[in-house]
Amino acid sequence: MSVHFNINEIGLFSLEQWPVLVCAWRGYYIEIFSRAEHSVSDCLSALEAAGITPGKDARAQAAVARLRALNACIGSHSFGRHGQRAQCRIAEWERLYQHRTCLAHGRIKPTANGVTIHHKTYNGKTETTIPPKHMSRLEMLETLAKIENAQRLLHQQLGQIKAHAKSVVLLTTKPQ
């Protein structure tokens, strides 16, 4: 499912339905991360279809592993400036990707001024409780806008990689 809406139209500063709006805000975050994961998967598929082998982690269960496989694949082929820009977009997305875990798995409580996020991490052996993160309504909007913009730029740049995938293969397999 993919839902596209303007976050400004749902009245994020209204107190009437604040808990419902917090759930919508969180859902929209997860939607943005989902869009990015689909962009990465589509690009990996396009590279494979063009004859470029993206590496063993291209089919990994973890989205971050697929993202890193794509980054390595782009770095090992000549996409010119498109490749360099794509790697910059991937690096920016990796920095923002840190928000995904706490937003997807944390316990989010609406407050009068915004939200508080409680989250625990697990490394297979131990549990770590992360200090609660407080976000004002303005911070919620700013962070959402930043993540949405990074996803859009990543999607556009990966579109350039997909468009040039066949020409990369042709350049590397020229008859001599």
Image (spheres, rainbow, N blue to C red):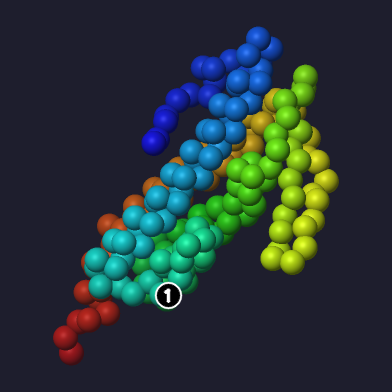
Q: Quadrant of the C terminus?
A: bottom left
Q: Amino acid at mark 1?
A: Lys
Can residue 132 be seen at all in this image of the molecule? yes
In the rendering, at what x and y percent does residue 145 appear?
Answer: 57, 34
Q: Tell me the residue at 65%/9% (across/down).
A: 16
Q: Residues within 10 Å of mark 1 (few under 14, many from 20)?
A: few
Horizontally, is 10 left or right of 101 in the view? left
Q: Quadrant of residue 114?
A: top right
Q: Quadrant of residue 173?
A: bottom left
Pick whichever, 69 or 2, lies toward us: 2
Horizontally, is 164 left or right of 74 in the view? left
Horizontally, is 176 left or right of 123 in the view? left
Q: Tell me the residue at 38%/57% (across/down).
A: 41
Q: Which residue is mark 1?
A: 56
Name above or below for residue 112 compared with residue 123.
Answer: above
Give the farthest residue toward the bottom. 176
Q: Quadrant of the N terminus?
A: top left
Horizontally, is 30 left or right of 52 in the view? right
Give the farthest residue toward the top. 16
In the rendering, at what x and y percent does residue 146 appear?
Answer: 59, 39
In the rendering, at what x and y percent does residue 36 appear?
Answer: 46, 48
Q: Secondary structure at mark 1?
A: helix
